[in-house]
Image (cartoon, rainbow, N blue to C red):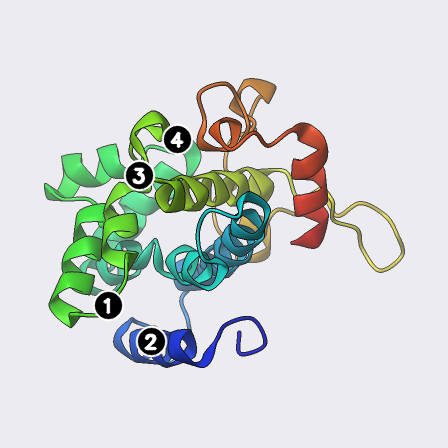
Amino acid sequence: IGTIMGQHHINIAGMLLDSLPMRGQKGGLTPIQKKLWMHSVSAALCSRFLALRQEVVDADTAFMCGLFHDSGQLLMQQFLKDEYEATWNEAESSGNYCELEQAQFGVDHTEIGQEAFRRWELPGPIAEVCRRHHDEPSTLDPLSCIVQASDDFVHWLERHPEAGRETDDGALQTESSDELWGLPVAETVTEDDRPNRPGSAAARLGLNDVELDDLAARL
């Protein structure tokens, strides 16, 4: 991360990483925490690439917002434990994270993330991006749109690991990240659910299939 971000953003990232749950009950990361951090790092890299492509928001800021956009899920997993794990596993299959969280707990991870960043009183737009990264794409500011497009793309890539990924012998990788972490495998996503489908954040940014394939290879 230090080779990507400036010192100011490194300092903020360090404070946030100290505040967020990084270990399970036995000292190591739980499978869900591993999956969430893998997803977050990928979304951060994707957000930075898209920010550099769009040239409308600061790339370091986009990286930070991508890295911490799902902080609310980490916090819910840490404090609600088994209750949240069941909800999260169901949401992984359906993609309806906010709806299921609201139904089960009366609050979703976007609200938790926003409130956490407000209480930490950290500068910058991370709290707002946490709150808005699942909103209707047409209503989003450029930074939130980039993070939502990155979030959607990484979720899609997790379900389609063959996109841009090869094993050491050159063969396409067939294991999803869910299988690698021992989690329930999400249902197959149809072409209509591609991250640049009409009306999506990626479509709003003008991303075409060739650019998505290139981004998959980079990640």
Q: Is residue 183 left or right of residue 144?
A: right
- Local packing at callout 4 (Cα closer than 10 Å; few below 14, some 14-19, many 20+) is few
Amino acid type at image mark 4: Ser
Q: Nearer the viewer, mark 4 or mark 1?
A: 1
Mark 3 residue element? helix
Q: Is residue 114 above or below residue 92?
A: below
* Cα distance between the residues tagged 3 and 2: 27 Å
Q: Is residue 182 visible?
A: no
For marks 1 and 3, the one nearer the N-term is 3
Mark 4 residue element? helix
Query: Which x, y percent locates residue 83?
Result: 21, 51
* Cα distance between the residues tagged 2 and 4: 33 Å
For marks 1 and 2, the one nearer the N-term is 2
Asked whether 87 or 199 is in front, the reply is 199
Please tell me which residue is depicted at 47% across the width and 39% down the height of the picture.
Answer: 149
* Cα distance between the residues tagged 1 and 2: 9 Å
- Local packing at callout 1 (Cα closer than 10 Å; few below 14, some 14-19, many 20+) is few
- Residue that numbered label 2 is attached to: 12
Outermost residue to the front = 56
Please tell me which residue is depicted at 16% across the width and 71% down the height of the picture.
Answer: 120
- Residue that numbered label 4 is attached to: 94
Assess whether mark 2 and mark 1 are in contact (beta carbons under 8 angstroms): yes
- Residue that numbered label 1 is attached to: 123
* Cα distance between the residues tagged 4 and 1: 34 Å
